[in-house]
């Protein structure tokens, strides 16, 4: 589990903005990239990031 103190100092390596914890991922609040957490260690590497999901069009 990631502590609130650690989460407060983490930032997206691309946008340099805040991140939030969502399940077993750290999510950038700006670009939406998702960074994995392995063995309670956030992997904040650009190459490890998952791109944000794009909403499906309904028109």
Image (cartoon, rainbow, N blue to C red):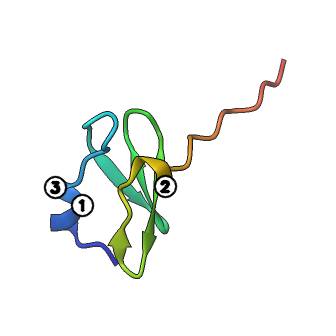
Question: What element does badge 3 sit on?
Answer: helix
Say if 34 sits above or below 56 in the image: below
Q: Quadrant of the N terminus?
A: bottom left
Q: Position of residue 53 (x, y in %)?
A: 63, 40
Please say if the residues under marks 1 and 3 sit with CB atoms less than 8 Å apart: yes
CA–CA distance in space, label 2 to label 1: 18 Å
Give whichever of 27, 14 is nearer the camera: 14
CA–CA distance in space, label 1 to label 3: 6 Å
Give whichever of 58, 6 is nearer the camera: 6
Residue 7, label in figure: 1
Q: Residue furthest front?
A: 47
Question: What element does badge 1 sit on?
Answer: helix
Q: Earlier in the sequence, mark 2 or mark 1?
A: 1
Determine crowd level at label 2: few under 14, some 14-19, many 20+ residues with C-alpha closer than 10 A.
few
Residue 54: name its quadrant: top right
Q: Quadrant of the C terminus?
A: top right
**Which residue is tagged 3?**
9
Say if 38 sits above or below 33 in the image: below
**Which residue is tagged 2?**
48
CA–CA distance in space, label 2 to label 3: 19 Å
Query: Horizontally, is 34 left or right of 19 in the view?
Result: right
Question: What element does badge 2 sit on?
Answer: helix
The number of callouts visible is 3
Determine crowd level at label 3: few under 14, some 14-19, many 20+ residues with C-alpha closer than 10 A.
few
Give whichever of 5, 38 is nearer the camera: 38
Residue at the image point whose x is 78% and y is 25% from the top: 57
Say if 52 sits above or below 58 in the image: below
Residue at the image point whose x is 36% and y is 78% from the top: 40
Residue at the image point whose x is 25% and y is 47% from the top: 11
Please say if the residues under marks 2 and 3 sit with CB atoms less than 8 Å apart: no
């Amino acid at each position: 589990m990631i502590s609130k103190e650690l989460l407060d100092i983490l930032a997206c390596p691309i946008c340099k903005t805040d991140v939030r914890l969502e399940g077993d991922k750290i999510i950038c609040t700006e670009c939406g990239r998702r960074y994995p957490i392995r063995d309670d260690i956030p992997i904040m590497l650009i190459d490890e990031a998952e791109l944000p999901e794009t909403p499906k069009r309904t028109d």
